[in-house]
């Protein structure tokens, strides 16, 4: 039997609840995990130019802060990010550096062609630490494009 | 001469140090938000009531820094909260503020990309606190 009310219901526009871009693998995310997850979420939501990279990025990136002995794994899943406390297995890239250097990475400017700028003060500092092995990136050579995409998503500049 | 920690006189001396800093003047260019530091009470350290440091920072200078209640500090655009002992560790260079935030020893509320963009300015603010000679209530 035809029910006119049902048709009206079907036409009603339903707004899906906003999906979370960033979730946490652990019941109690560490302060560092919350900070990086919050930073990336705020970056992607407030800067539309970062959305494309975030949507395409599929990689597991470990970040280990050597002077506080804490780390996280950022598991980018193409438009979603799951943040793990500590270093999880099967990482594409692992960045190891002191806290100050990790903050410098998020302050790298993005230049033409979407490449991080290594010739200003912050960029020179990061490049110098890479050369002196105060910044170590495991898996860098085969994943250079991934690193550039992660840097674009991560950068607040 | 040492100044009583988190007193009005201390806030004034801290403001003077910030405004004397060429590093802060440069690193803080473009900053236009208020910052509140909540210093949580620790009665066993002779710091019986929570206090707030309310900072009106603008474009590389401190327009005003004054003491208020914790609630006053919590109204600011950016709020950093920690117990008295932690702030003492920061002001005596035993704890780096950036590391403290990453470890959750200092709790930050506010827009993260903005505060990260001004990491150098916040590091210099910390340096300015270390230049003020302080009389700590738990060392009397």
Image (cartoon, coloured by chain):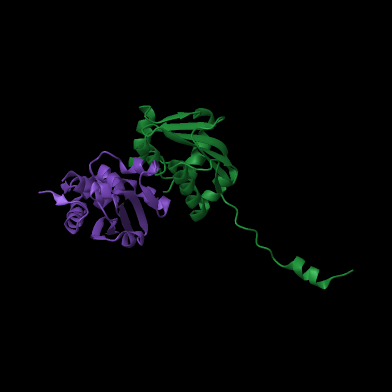
Is A9 left or right of A141, judged from the image as shown?
right
**Residue B79 to residue A114: above or below:** below
Residue B93 picture location, percent across and down: 24, 40
Chain in purple colour: B
Pick the quarter of the image with the N terminus of chain A: bottom right
**Residue at figure coordinates x 31%, y 46% from the top left:** B120
From this viewpoint, is residue B128 visible?
Answer: no
Is B49 left or right of A44, judged from the image as shown?
left
Q: Nearer the viewer, residue B45 or A135?
A: B45
Q: Nearer the viewer, residue A6 or B105?
A: B105
Residue B53 picture location, percent across and down: 27, 57
Residue A8 picture location, percent across and down: 77, 70
**Residue B46 to residue A65: above or below:** below
**Residue at figure coordinates x 56%, y 48% from the top left:** A52
**Residue at figure coordinates x 13%, y 48% from the top left:** B2
Q: In the rendered picture, chain A carries what hue?
A: green
């Amino acid at each position: 039997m035809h029910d006119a009310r049902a048709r009206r219901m079907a036409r009603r526009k339903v707004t899906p609840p906003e999906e979370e871009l960033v979730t946490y693998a652990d019941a109690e995310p560490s302060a560092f995990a919350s900070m990086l997850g919050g930073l990336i979420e705020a970056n992607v939501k407030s800067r539309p130019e970062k959305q494309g990279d975030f949507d395409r990025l599929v990689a597991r990136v470990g970040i280990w802060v050597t002077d506080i002995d804490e780390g996280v794994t950022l598991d980018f899943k193409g438009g979603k990010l799951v943040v793990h406390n500590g270093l999880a297995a099967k990482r594409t890239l692992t960045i190891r550096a002191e806290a100050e250097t990790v903050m410098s990475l998020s302050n790298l400017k993005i230049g033409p062609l979407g490449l991080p700028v290594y010739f200003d003060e912050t960029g020179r500092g990061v490049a110098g630490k890479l050369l002196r092995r105060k910044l170590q990136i495991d898996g860098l050579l085969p994943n250079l494009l991934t690193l550039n995409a992660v840097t674009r998503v991560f950068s607040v500049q | 001469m040492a100044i009583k920690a988190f007193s009005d006189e201390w806030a004034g001396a801290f403001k003077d140090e910030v405004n004397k800093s060429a590093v802060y003047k440069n690193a803080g260019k473009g900053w236009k938000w208020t910052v509140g530091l909540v210093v949580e009470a620790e009665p066993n350290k002779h710091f019986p009531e929570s206090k707030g440091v309310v900072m009106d920072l603008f474009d590389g200078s401190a327009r005003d820094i004054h003491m208020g209640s914790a609630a006053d500090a919590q109204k600011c655009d950016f709020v950093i909260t920690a117990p008295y002992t932690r702030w003492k560790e920061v002001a005596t260079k035993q704890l780096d503020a950036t590391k403290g935030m990453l470890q959750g020893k200092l709790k930050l509320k506010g827009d993260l990309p903005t505060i990260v963009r001004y990491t150098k300015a916040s590091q210099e603010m910390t340096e300015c606190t270390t230049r003020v000679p302080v009389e700590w209530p738990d060392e009397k």
